[in-house]
Amino acid sequence: MHITIRAFEESDRESLRRLYVVSRNEAFSWRPAAHHQPADFDAHTEGERILVAVVDGEVLGFASIWEPDSFVHNLFVHPSAKRRGLGQALLEGCARYFNKPPTLKCLTENTNAVQFYQAQGWAILSEDTGPEGPYFLMGKA
């Protein structure tokens, strides 16, 4: 399997909208499925650099970065493609856009994501609560 990480193209938008909803429904299982909408992708990535993970011509993941703060805002992999290296490849692709030590927020209830980031060398810096609930601020040196 060959993973390609590339810049977002407008032709990716519909695929990423669907992937965003499916991935959030799976990752945030404590929320009702109707809570996540395709238009959320547009609102939650506005003004951000978006990288796309492609395998055999199929878009299977993405990450978005708020570059001024070296902040990974979103990282989602389609549930059917988890544990195949796409998340790690996306994080590695993001690294070239960081101008200082990067951070991200991860909901504390999303234990799979917390474990994933820790396995990639990210550490919990602090804990707080936001509109979506309690989260960890994580960083990588």
Image: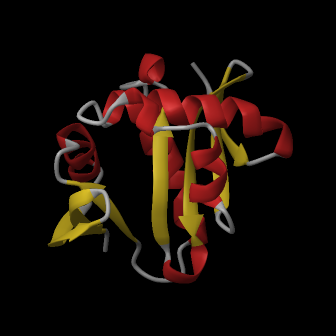
How many numbered marks appear?
Answer: 0
Q: Residue 138 at x, y = what percent?
A: 26, 66
Q: Is residue 47 above or below residue 32?
A: below
Residue 8 visible at all: yes
Which quadrant of the rendered structure holds the C terminus? bottom left
Q: Identify the image quadrant of residue 13.
A: top right
Which quadrant of the rendered structure holds the N terminus? top right
Residue sitting at x 45%, y 16%:
80
31 relative position to 51: left or right: left
22 relative position to 59: left or right: left
Residue sitting at x 22%, y 61%:
135
Residue 85 visible at all: no
Q: Residue 38 at x, y = what percent?
A: 61, 37
Q: Is residue 98 above or below residue 44?
A: below
Residue sitting at x 35%, y 27%:
26
Q: How is the image coloured?
A: secondary structure
119 relative position to 67: left or right: left
Residue in the foreground of this view, choosing between 60 and 101: 60
Q: Is residue 140 above or below residue 18?
A: below
Q: Identify the image quadrant of residue 9.
A: top right
Q: Is residue 74 above or below residue 86?
A: below
Q: Residue 98 at x, y = what percent?
A: 53, 74
Q: Residue 114 at x, y = what percent?
A: 22, 49
124 relative position to 48: left or right: left
Residue in the foreground of this view, choosing between 94 and 127: 127
Residue sitting at x 74%, y 21%:
57
